[in-house]
Amino acid sequence: MRGLTFDIAHMLAGSLVLVSFMQLYQDRLYALLNIFALHASVLAASVAWQAFIQDAPHLYLTAVIALGFKAIIIPVALHRIIVRLGIHREIETVVGIGPTMLLGMGLVALSMVVMLRVTAEADPLAREDLAFALSVILLGLLMMVTRRNAVSQVVGFMSLENGLVLAATGAKGMPLVVEISVAFSVLIAFIVIGIFLFRIRERFDTVDVQALDHFRGERR
Amino acid sequence: MVIYALYGVGALVALSPIAVALGASLRVSRIVYVASLIVTLLLSAIALRCLFGHSSLLGVTLPLGLPWLGAHFRIDALSAFFLAVINLGGAAASLFALGYGEHEHSPQRVLPFYPAYLAGMNLVVLADDAFSFLASWEVMSLSSWALVIAHHQDRENLRAGYVYLLMAGFGTLALLLAFGLLAGAHGGYAFEVMRASHPSAGLAALVLVLALVGAGSKAGVVPLHAWLPLAHPAAPSHVSALMSGVMTKVAVYGFVRIVFDLLGPPAWWWSMLVLAIGGITAVMGVLYALMQHDLKRLLAYHTVENIGIIFIGLGLALAFKAYGMEFAAALALTAGLLHVFNHSVFKSLLFFGAGAVLNATGECDMEHLGGLIHRMPQTAFVFLVGCVAISALPPLNGFVSEWLTFQAILLSPQLSSWGLKLLVPAVGALLALSAALAAACFVKAFGVSFLGRPRTPAAANAHETDGQSLAAMFFLAALCLVAGILPGVFIDALAPVSKALVGVGMPHQGSIDWLTIVPVADSRSSYNGLLVFVFVVLSSSVAAFAIHRLASDKLRRGPAWDCGYPDARPETQYSASSFAQPIRRVYGTLIFRAREIGEMPPPGATSPAKLVVELRDLIWDVAYAPIAVGVGYAAEKLNSLQFLTIRQYLSLVFSALVLLLLVLAVWP
Amino acid sequence: MALIRDFAFQGAQMLLVLLLAPLLTGFVRKVKARLLRRQGPPLLQPYRDLIRLTRKEVVLAESASWLFRVIPYIVFAGTWVAASLVPTFRGGLLFSWSADLIAIIALLGSARFFLALAGLDVGTSFGGIGSSREVMIASLAEPAMLMVVFTLALVAGSTQLSTMATYMLSSDVGLRVSLGLALFALIMVAIAENARIPIDNPATHLELTMVHEAMVLEYSGRHLALIDLSSELKLLLYISVIGCLFVPWGMAMPPPSPQGVAIGVGSYAVKLAVGGVLLAVFETSIAKMRVFRVPAFLGAALMLGLLATLLLFVSRSL
Amino acid sequence: MTFDALVGVLLVPAIAAAMLAALPGYRLAARLNMLAALLTFVVALSLFFVKPKAGSYLLVDDLNKIFIVLTTFVGFTTSVFSASYISHEIEIGRLTPATVRFYHAMYQTLMFAMNLALVANNIGLMWVAIELATLTTVLMVGIYRTHEALEAAWKYFILGSVGIALALFGTILVYMAARPVVGEGLDAMIWTMLVQHAARFDPALLNVAFVFLLLGYGTKVGLAPLHAWLPDAHAEGPTPISAVLSGLLLNVALYALLRFKMLLALTPAAIAPGPLMVTMGLISCVFAAFMLYRRRDIKRMFAYSSIEHMGIIVFAFGMGGPLANFAGLLHMTMHSLTKSAIFFAVGHVAQVKGTQRIADIGGLTVTNPVLGWGLVLGVIAIAGLPPLGIFMSEFLVVSSTFARQPWLAIALALGILIALGGLFLRLNTIAFGEPRGPTAPAHASYVPMFAHLAIVFVVGIYMPPALVTGFQNVAKLLG
């Protein structure tokens, strides 16, 4: 049974990394949102599995939060925003998809190397999870860096937070305060972003960060 | 004793807020200057008392500054001497300012800082630990900076103040590092702790270099002098006098304190460094001065020259000390310190004179002056005294200290190091050269601005300056004469200082008959200013009497002969730059890349012919301009980081993260 | 008693230099004239000139200041005092210790300083030319002179003229390269300082070549007399310095015996005569150089002096 | 949990925030704001006399006591300044009463968040508090709704939340490291517990954790190259907020960093945090010094100077040792006071001249002498010239470093010198020279500015023994 639980957790976490790669691969906003929803649900699954094997019921709550918020509400809301603001649908990338994927590979390798140096008596499950979580975080960050489009940057940020949740749940017995704070922060973050998008709507025709950066402080 | 001195300083410090509170008016300026005059006089009395042996070397420690250390203050012979120099200069300046300050058009930018400036300089020489020393040092710089930019509407003054502040900060940091070395990792910032700790040879050498850079940048040692001729003239004249005559001496004090007192036994090659720099500074300074036509700037450059002379004396003292020749060391050190005093006297005098001229004519440019001796005879007289003194001519005081320096140089063959054997004569030649050039320089300064015929209406309508200013100038002139004809007294006063620093003092001069001074031995060399003075006065008056009696004393005024050229206009007089032309031809082409471009109008054109003289300050071009350009370049390049997009900033964060993770990955 | 005698000697010395100076100048002129196969002025002509000048009234330029009138006396006094401190026929003068060689040079420096000021005082172009060139020459001549002094002082271990003379008399001097160099430099400096050909021409009044004369152009009457007298004194002084330092033989040393003094006076006269003849010959046999060749000339003197000193340091250390 | 001073410093701002959110009328609101801030400060002062025992959520020790008092004090003076500032803003119509109500509520929320971060005994709680502080300041930076303000807020928001996310990951890792030793659950996040058992933590985990915490909280501290949000946020937000950002929020982030440094220092096998901090501090100092030269906006210039000083402080703490730590603490305190004073002055300047462009401001000492000389004094202080407090701390940092690491000290000294040049280059045109721009008299309260400067001046000359012992204890604590 021990082996199986481990394999499943491992499989779920790994698939989360895989989905992050899929996100990197996308070049259409809607597709990106769908993939993000998938990302969130995989996260929810892995959190639920963690809740089961750690028999820590409060983690189920986290799983539900993840599923509810990130897999459903946020993608839908972003859908709406895209429609409302009439953001054009394809994602402008800085680096081409291919190089980005390669970079991602490198990052995953890096996070493995860093994490596997951790002494083994911290239980292997945590180690694997942390390794995957770190790579998910780095991939999210990579996405924020290589995408010009505000929405995709937001998505990158979200997947980064998913990585955080994964790590938090991987941490055995971590108090609920953390998950709540994560959800809380995501909520606040989302609200603020929403406010900003609308304010920006008032002033700009696009939420393209380039346009936002147009004045850049002292270029007056 | 020291506690009274501190009271005095406290009084000065208290003056600044009072000046701010009372606001700017004639009455307030009188109050401030009278008060600082009184306090400085008291302080100089204290200093002299300490210098002539009645000082208890006990210091006081106030619960200020670094909490666990406290602020240590102490008066030993060295600080007593410099305290005297500072406060004599300060008293003279305050007296002068009583009259001069009335013409100040923005007193509210001068009055609050003037007492603070005096207080800062006093505190520097009183301080007995690194923190108080540096703090007072910076206060001194800062208040003088405020005084330099007192007339801030003139952009040149602002620039001068800016350069000055940067150089001051640079020097302070150098001193800070030097003290950091002396104090060690555990922070033994008190001076007695530093004396006790003996740094290794390499460390000591580093400290010496840092001290030379730090104190030298304040004293105006070439090539760190660039700020000096900008800042000193920019300030009001009594402050210029203080900066040139006194503050540079405080810098010299810093150097002496660190190198002779705190640093322990010197290595022989240190003196080579100091000597070389001193010689170069002396000659470069006077050559720069010769090229100027602004009176105050000329005087400022001349300060550089005298600082060089002082450093030559100090360098010789280091050399002799390194070889354990105490008496020679005492001679050289005394020569240097005596020149410190002399220069503070006549440089203040000359700056006062320049200030009086500035008040009377509104001009400091010699090309616009001339003939002032007719309109302001008394100022002309004291200025002449100052010129003779600074040109190291007997029987005034400038000659005595240079004579002593020469005597010290003549002792140098007994040094057993080859480097010094070859260097010292060369330095002697440089010293002689600078002395001769100084004479030329002041013939120019006095001759062009005071003699001849007025070149502008302003000069023609000049008026004699006020009583207080004249009083201050006559006081200093008298001091020049006294120190010139009775040098023995001053040499004996310096004996305790050299006893404290190199072990012995010069032989006691007061006991020698006829008030002669004999530095080493009777058969070797001796000088008697008094007799020379008496002889000159006697013989000249005898000659005058005889001729007027026995021959004619008739006199008729007529037009100038001038080889028969009729009524030449004042413009045909020699101007400052034309006076300097021969010397510029000789030295300038090499050092200043001096070029004379003559523009002849075509035949028939009525426009006048022009002669343009181009001078380049090579030191600025080589040492300073590149730094400014470099900083500007770096700033420009880095500035692009202000204009990135959010995504690019994120990628900065991202790459920092990846970098650190890589570091962890390869961490053993 | 001894003090009185010393006073007497000192006084005699002062008067002697004062009286001999014009004679020397006249002598040089005479020799020059003869070398040029001219009759030349009588030997005593300089005295006549001086007396005539003192009798004349002074014509003073309107723009001249009080300083202009004081300066001749200062210049004269400075030169005279300097000259009277140089041992001529007898060493160990009473007041010789009141100023050593460096101080004497500095005294001459002060005289020149004031003379240069006088050149600027009236505010004419020629005065300016004179003083500016004078200070340029001095700025090179004085260091050269000081280098010479260094050399001699290092040899003799003193800057006291009498002591130096005594040392030179003593046997342990020997023949030194640096002394030769120093002598050479000293002669060059002396020529320059006394405004002789090739540096300057005391006889000319062709404006653009004047240096010394241009400075004193505005002087007349007694003032001019004093100026001339002091330049004559200066010439005498330099010759006697050379004599006292390099050919001190015959100089009477204390305690003086009458015959010693007699020998001293005689030898001194001989030295002056020889010096004058040599000067005249040199001047007649050479042409005046352009003003801006002068720096090269004096720079050479400075280099010689420095070289002499360095050689001395090196030889000392061996 | 019984009510004590700790709860007080949290409750007062929370209640005040609620009231202000409800309260219309900005004059009354401003007064209430001042009152609440003053009350908080008084309560904080009481910490010196009654020492509450550390609970499992809140704690007070020598370290955060200093921070709390400093924060509440500057919070109070800033509220005084903000009253006059805001009223002027409403007169010229840059702000509407509605936004002002929002502003006041946010101000107290910010106070609450910062105090919470300081007194939290739980790393999770501290993280939440700092996150809250970030979000509130984001909202206040954007309050003017101009292009630049929105852009600045957006930039601040994105960079800030990324940093905060990294910090959270670091926190989780610390928990992971602590769990095997301390045991599962809440205990593994409580400072006091962590510090007790830190020696047996897994070093490798702590290393990774510290990297994330350094980058995460370092972003808030404003270390280069994570600084990008700081200048714009300072330049575009209302000036009181700039003062609070520079004076307080940076300190709070620094406080978190220091806590974790202590933790790491207790674990022998882990990498030494010192070199990392020294490097980043040095980079920030020199970089910001160069950035001062090309500035055109006066508030942005002083924001860069904040980066420079944060660099110096982090450098000092990185060097470690009693002297350097003491210097770091002193420098931090002096910098908060001085920099907020400068921002008070700058705020009034900008209101008088109607612009923040340096090119349009000139000759202040002629047109507005009090304001101008106040600014000059502030710049002199911030440039590290005596007799003001920062000179003392820089003296200690440089000289104590030079004996240990000469090259580092020289680099730092050069940075300081370059910064001096940059600051005075601009000050020359701002305070001196020909007057430029409107010359209306500034109707403002100079009290806060000169109060700060007076404190800085006094400390530069005489440090009260109580302060000294307090700092020295903390310096020992920091190791």
Image (cartoon, grey):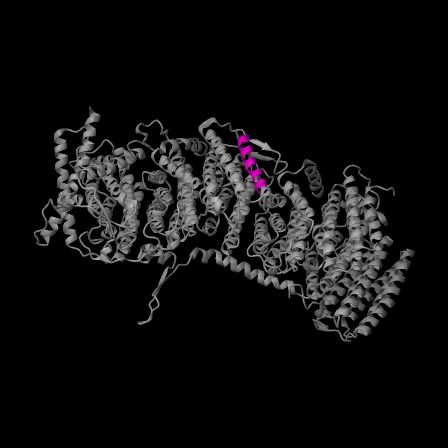
The answer to whether residue C57 is visible is yes
B421, B4: nearer the viewer: B4
State the residue at coordinates (71%, 39%). D470
Extreme residue in the top direction: C1
B496, C84: nearer the viewer: C84
**Above or below, comparing residue B194 to residue B655 in the picture:** above
What segment carries the magenta color? B2-19
Q: Position of residue D348 (x, y in %)?
A: 67, 54
Q: In which quarter of the image is residue C284?
A: bottom left
Q: Does the magenta stretch include residue B642?
A: no
For the stretch drawn in magenta, what is the main secondary structure? Answer: helix
Q: Does the magenta stretch include residue B6?
A: yes
**Above or below, comparing residue B530 to residue A141 in the picture:** above
Q: Where is residue C113 in the image (x, y as percent from the top left)?
A: 30, 46
- Quadrant location of the N terminus of chain A in the rendered image: bottom right
Q: In which quarter of the image is residue A76?
A: bottom right
